Amino acid sequence: MKKICLMAIIAFIVATFTVHAQDNTVLWKISGNGLKKDSYLLGTMHIMCEDDYILKDKVKNLIPLVDVVTFEVNLASEENKALIPEMMKPDTSFLKGLSQGELSKIDSILISQGLSVKMLEMMSPAVFVSVLSLKSMNCSDPRNVKTMEADIQTLAASANKKIDDLETLKFQIDMLNSMFKASDLLKYLEKIDEMPAVSNKMVTAYKAENLKDLETVIYDSSYMSKEEQADFLTKRNNNWINKMPAKMTQSSHLFAVGAGHLVGNEGLLKLLTAKGYKLTPIL
């Protein structure tokens, strides 16, 4: 009887530690399922204010250990570099179809933020929303924002590591163009006063590596519909999960993707586990 109780207590402690660990790390080791070498999955935050940014040693120390560093997109590839100007081009028909009242509302909100609807004549809608997102982060100096993927890529290049990707920049451009409409811009702008608080929650959750809180912020605070969230996260996760096994069989990878892709019922952590891999938190 005492032995059974002791085993139950041990099991409870292990389970409690596992739950705690799962909630508090963005870096995971992928092993088992016939892999000869371990791979790793890192959830990144694409853009952060310099004051908030840190690339932890546990990530830096992994780069020399893997064969390949794999991003969502390899922006440094010659093919993708050639596509970046295309991604920046304005869409002259973007605002067509909106009523005069909706156009006036967009213009009024942008003016209140020190911006102008004329910015859409100089950049693509997706880039414009990136500008709005950056503004919502309230960086002390927006010119010094940090990009985690860029730092990781620099370290990978210094270590002579191969760079790979999970999708093409063309795919991302086509996806954003098909997903993001003028009505989505209006929905975003209608919530723009809430966005600094949302950004702060996201940064706080990320710095604490608290996936549970991060999931809540991403899914409960998004201006995207459930269908758009599925296109942006779920469908891409399922595309990636079909590519990752072959990559991991051939080489040891550090997969660095947006942290939002790790969480949720169809996040990469659950999808990899369902495929038979063992996911171990790196604290």
Image: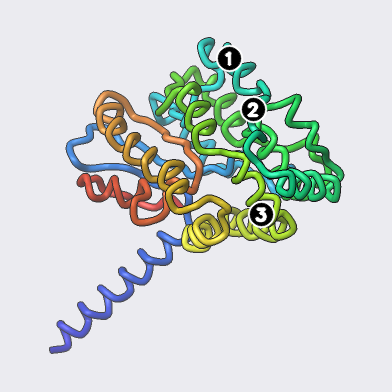
Disc 3/disc 1 C-alpha distance (Å): 29 Å
Dot 3, how many residues are within 10 Å of its Cα: few (below 14), some (14-19), or many (20+)? many
Side of 230 relative to 137 (left or right): left
Question: How many badges with numbers are in the image?
Answer: 3
Q: Position of residue 256 (x, y in %)?
A: 47, 36
Tell me which residue sits at (31%, 69%) in the image: 14
SS for dot 3: helix
Q: Please, is residue 53 above or below residue 254 in the view? A: below
Of the image marks 2 and 3, the number of the one nearer the N terminus: 2
Disc 2/disc 1 C-alpha distance (Å): 25 Å
Q: Which residue is mark 1?
A: 81
Q: Which residue is mark 3?
A: 199
Q: Position of residue 238 (x, y in %)?
A: 32, 40
Hey, which residue is sitting farthest bottom in the picture? 1
Tell me which residue sits at (26%, 50%) in the image: 273
Disc 2/disc 3 C-alpha distance (Å): 30 Å
- In this rendering, the label closer to the viewer, 2 or 3: 2
Q: Which dot marks residue 93?
A: 2
Dot 1, how many residues are within 10 Å of its Cα: few (below 14), some (14-19), or many (20+)? few
Q: Position of residue 140 (x, y in %)?
A: 83, 46
Hey, which residue is sitting farthest left in the picture? 1
Which residue type carries mark 2?
Answer: Ser
Which residue type carries mark 3?
Answer: Ser
Residue 3 or 232: which is nearer the viewer?
Answer: 232
Q: Position of residue 233 (x, y in %)?
A: 43, 44
Residue 213 or 253: which is nearer the viewer?
Answer: 213
Residue 140 or 36: which is nearer the viewer?
Answer: 140
